[in-house]
Amino acid sequence: MSSFSWFLLALPLLSGAMMPMQAGINGQLARHIDSVLSASLISFLVGSLLLLVITLAQRELPSSLLPFKGLSWWHWTGGLLGVLFVVSAAFAGPRIGALLFMSLVLAGQMSAAVVLDHYGWAGFPQASVTPGKIAGLVLIVVGVWLIRRG
């Protein structure tokens, strides 16, 4: 396996490993400033500033507004979906714990991923639902139930 292939596997694994850390940090921030929404805003501002610096350093800004002309309304919703995660993490994470929170996030992610793959929506390659995929989802839900029972 090439080093790039390993990177394609390692990057989502690392990203996933950081999600409970992000939820915890944002939850603590919300508690310290006494506002889930303000903590979420700070999180997005810091992330946006970093992305701006990286984008400017890589010189990846569009040279004109022409690429934006063909965008559909749903192309703009990614940030809205990010807000839902960050706000729910800052609110629910500290109240239900990292493991249960992330188990529920995983169950939601996997359920949505099966639908996205099955229909090939949002630019993902089409991959039909199979009994094995459904069994995997059921096991995740059972895992959430077991975690919830403590």
Image: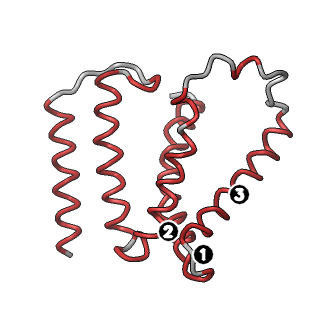
- Label whose residue precedes the other's in the sequence (3 or 2): 3
Rendering quarter of residue 68: top right
Q: Do the residues labelled 3 and 2 touch (CB within 8 Å)?
A: no
Q: Viewer-proximal residue, 80 or 100?
A: 80
Give the mark count. 3
The kind of residue on which mark 2 rests is Ala
* Depicted 73 relative to depicted 69: above or below: below
Residue 137 x %, y %:
21, 44
Q: Residues within 10 Å of mark 2 (few under 14, many from 20)?
A: many
Whether the residues at callouts 1 and 2 have beta carbons within 8 Å, the answer is yes
Q: Name the residue under label 2.
A: 90
Left or right of residue 119: residue 81: right
Gap in angstroms between the C-alphas marked 3 and 2: 15 Å
Percent position of residue 144, x then y: 23, 61
* Amino acid at pointer 3: Leu
Q: Residue at x 31, y 67 (%)?
A: 100
Identify the residue shown where x is 53% and y is 35%. 8
Of the image marks 3 and 1, the number of the one nearer the N terminus: 1
- Quadrant including the C terminus: bottom left
Q: Which of the labelled discs sits on residue 45, or is there none?
A: 3
Q: Where is residue 118 in the image (x, y as percent from the top left)?
A: 28, 24
Query: Badge 1 is on which residue?
Result: 29
